[in-house]
Every structure is written in structure tokens, then in C-alpha cells.
Image: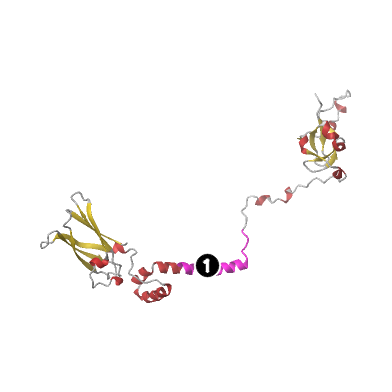
Amino acid sequence: MTEEKYTRCPGCHTVFRVTAQQLAMREGQVRCGHCKTVFDGNAERIALSPPAQSAEGDDAYDEAVQGPPTVTLRNAQALHPVHPADADEPPEDEPEEDISEIAYEERFAWARPSKPRRSVSALLGIALPLLVIALAAQLVFHYRNALAARWPAAKPALAEVCALAGCAINPPRDLAMQYLSIDASDLQADPAHRGLLILTANVRNHATWPVAYPDLEFSLTDTNSVTVVRRVLAPSDYAGGAADLTKGIAPNAEVPVKLFIDASATSQAGYYLYMFYP
């Protein structure tokens, strides 16, 4: 069994397991893969096995000849062959550790944000008010009808702004359904005309501001409550020709509904009447 050979880097004292072929190359000149020191591998060869104790006894036994009690052992692949141009270079100093420069007390501290530059602060000071104004303008545009209805004094100013923006002030639809109701709804056959039905009802606005006219959905059902006829009635169909649809239903007012419906081609047992905004 071939005896294992070892060499030790004089720079970092790392011990490498080497082969005879490796030491024969470049006359034994190698470079440490740990600290990059160039040294003569033959001259720095060491033996890790302890020498036989001399006959002089324990007092003559020198523990230092065994080398350090603990070594860093690396294989031959950690040594790099040295080119001729590198052989004349002086050995590199062992790299110095920078452990003392590490601020251990701040290892887990959050990074403190740097103070923004004055130009960035100035830009934010201008941009934020503009964004707030833009958001307020969008809200006013979206709820312009409700604002004009609830605060009539603001309606002229809103109308002027809408004239520039290409919009209009109309009776509000938002949340209007909770203020509208259908009262006194009834469906009767016309005694003078066979197959003709008369629909009467009142659409009432319970709000303290005008709201837009809703559409009405009228359905006839059979004995099983299955729809046999459905018709959508626009405000112009039931509000009458004298009503101003652009102004909406006045506050605390009601609109009477009376319609004649031809049901001669169907048979029905009931009806439904709903309000909605298309």
C-alpha cells in the first residue's frame, strides 16, 4: 500500500493530501487553494503519524515534533499547479479576517431608510395636493346628479362645469330605488271592450329631492304563476305627455299610471309590476 503524503501551506497552515506525481510537476511548486500562497510542496512535506517513542523514556518525548494537534486537511484537488511565471512571485500574505469590523449588534436591525432628497420632497409636496384635487373632481363628476338634487344651491355651478366637460345634470338614479314605491296597483278587465285590460297604479317618490323616472316591467301570468306576456314600459309610456321627464319625479310626489292593455290573445290569472332603471 502506497504511503500517503502530506504537505502544509506555510501561509495558512492548511494540510493537503498530495501525490508523488503532483509534487513532481513544476519541481514541487504549488499554490494553496485556500490563501493562494505559492510554496514548495516538497520542502513543506509533513508526516501526520506520530514518530516512534525513543528508548530514553517519556521525558525525552517531544510532543512538538508531531505538529499541531488539530489540522485542516484538504485533498490534492485544492492545490493548483504553478506556472513558471508565477513561481518567482513572492508568497501572498494570508488574507486578514475582517470579523472585528462587523457590527454584530446591528446584524438583525432593520435598515434605516435614508432621508429623501429635498427635490423629491418638493415633488411629493406638489403631487399629493394635485392627486387629492383630481380624486375630489372624479367624485363630484360621478355623484353630480345626487349633489345637485340634495343641494339645489350647488346645481348652477355644477351645470356650468358640466357644460365645459360635456356632461349634464339629470335627476339622480343612485339610491333612488329605496325612495320609490308602487302604490294602489290594480288590473281590471274593461267592461266595454272584451279582451282589454286596464292597469292603474301610482309611482311615488318618498325622497325630499327629485329622482329620475324608472321603467316599469309589466307581466301577465297563468294559474301556475308562469309568465305568458311581458312588456317594458318606458316613462314616456306611462307618465303622460304633460310630464317633464328631464326634471324627474318631484319630491314627495306621485305619478298616476293608467294603461290599456290588449290581452285578447292570451289567458291570464295574475300579473306583476316592477320598477327598474335600465
Vertical comparison of 163 with 85: above or below: below
**Which image quadrant for residue 21?**
top right
* The magenta stretch spans residue 114: yes
- Up/down of 208 relative to 39, above or below: below
> What x and y, as percent, mark residue 261?
18, 61
Q: Position of residue 48 (x, y in %)?
A: 81, 30
In this rendering, position of residue 78 left or right of residue 27: left
Q: Nearer the viewer, residue 92 or 79?
A: 79
The answer to whether residue 17 shows anywhere in this view is yes
Image mark count: 1
How crowded pointer 1 is (Cα within 10 Å; few <14, some 14-19, many 20+) is rated as few
For this orientation, the residue located farthest to the right is: 56
Q: Is residue 71 visible?
A: no
Q: In which quarter of the view is residue 204 placed?
A: bottom left
Query: Which image quarter is the N terminus in?
Result: top right
Give the residue type that dot 1 points to.
Leu
**Residue 95 on image: x %, y %:** 78, 46
Q: Determine the image quadrant of residue 52.
A: top right
> In the displayed structure, would residue 267 be above or below residue 73?
below
- Residue farthest left in this picture: 192
Q: Position of residue 115 (x, y in %)?
A: 62, 63
Compare residues 272 and 93 and report the one nearer the observer: 272
The magenta segment: 113-135
Looking at the rendering, in which quadrant would you find the C terminus?
bottom left
The residue at 58%/69% (across/down) is 122
The residue under label 1 is 128
> From the viewer's perspective, is residue 208 above or below residue 264?
below
Secondary structure mainly formed by the magenta segment:
helix
Residue nearer the viewer, 70 or 242: 242
